Amino acid sequence: MTAAVLIAAAGIFAGCKKDDDKVKATGVTVCPTDIMLEIGKTVPLLATVMPSNADNHSVKWTSTNVDVATVNADGVVTALDIGEATITCTTNDGGFTDKSIVIVNALRNDNDYATLVPGFYFGNMMMDGETVGENNRITVRYNSKNKAEFSINESFKVPEMGNIEVPMNVYCIADMTKDGTGYKAEGKTTASMMGMSFPVDIEAIFDGVYKVDMTIYVSGIPMPGMDNLVISFIGTGITEIDPCFQLD
């Protein structure tokens, strides 16, 4: 064997990782962990394989009740019928699992919903004190189980990316609690942005009349200045909170 062939072979083997050298997966988390959907609706789940430098981040998704909810290879859940299903994510490396509980309701009947908060809030989105979205709309409904539904389908400008507009789609079920004369809502979900899904934490304070002060925390965006994105929204509703509303 010539020296050139030996050198080339050595280079090939040097570039190959032995199994002992690979970083093994040690776990996985799924977000959100609880979902409420209407029949026909979809929502993406986000799987995070640990550690972040694991060599194999691939996972597989399964549903315990495909008649109620299915999940595709990308973790997108589709609600099919009233009931409950558990969506399980399993790592291909090591077989670690995490789950999300999906509850599917019938198509919403507005008569089943209290008028806790206005159907719509209008306001501006802010980032680092700078307006990045104007006249944005956030839909908020109360689903009669001490929960608030937030729906956001808006675009905002990103200064770090030359003020290009980035569409953001968020659906969240948040827990409602009494907060002084108003109400506080907190929830975790995922946001669809730029064709990807990212973990989201939402906090909102309702002042008891017309206003909402919301903070949206988005983490994990692989772009400079956006890895821990914080968007503020101060909005004004079109009607006041139903004075007859009381938390359970």
Image (cartoon, rainbow, N blue to C red):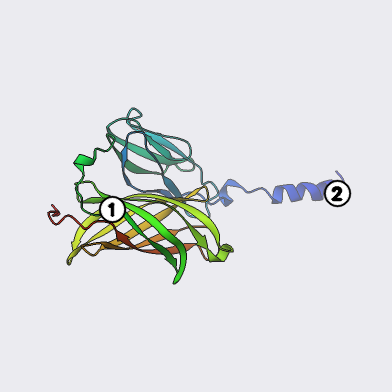
Residue 6 lies left or right of residue 182; in this view the side is right
Q: Residue furthest bottom?
A: 129
Of residues 82 and 159, which is closer to you in this image?
A: 159
| Quadrant including the N terminus | top right
Residue for badge 1 = 174
Tell me whether circle 2 and circle 1 mark residues in contact (CB < 8 Å): no
* Residue 4: image tag: 2
Q: Would residue 224 be found to the left or right of residue 204 on screen?
A: right
| Label number found at residue 166 | none
Residue type at numbered disc 1: Ala
Viewer-closest of 215 and 139: 139
Q: Earlier in the sequence, mark 2 or mark 1?
A: 2
Indicate the secondary structure of the residue bearing disc 1: strand
Mark 2 or 1: the one toward you:
1
Indicate the quadrant where residue 68 lies.
top left
Residue at position x 53%, y 55% in the image: 53
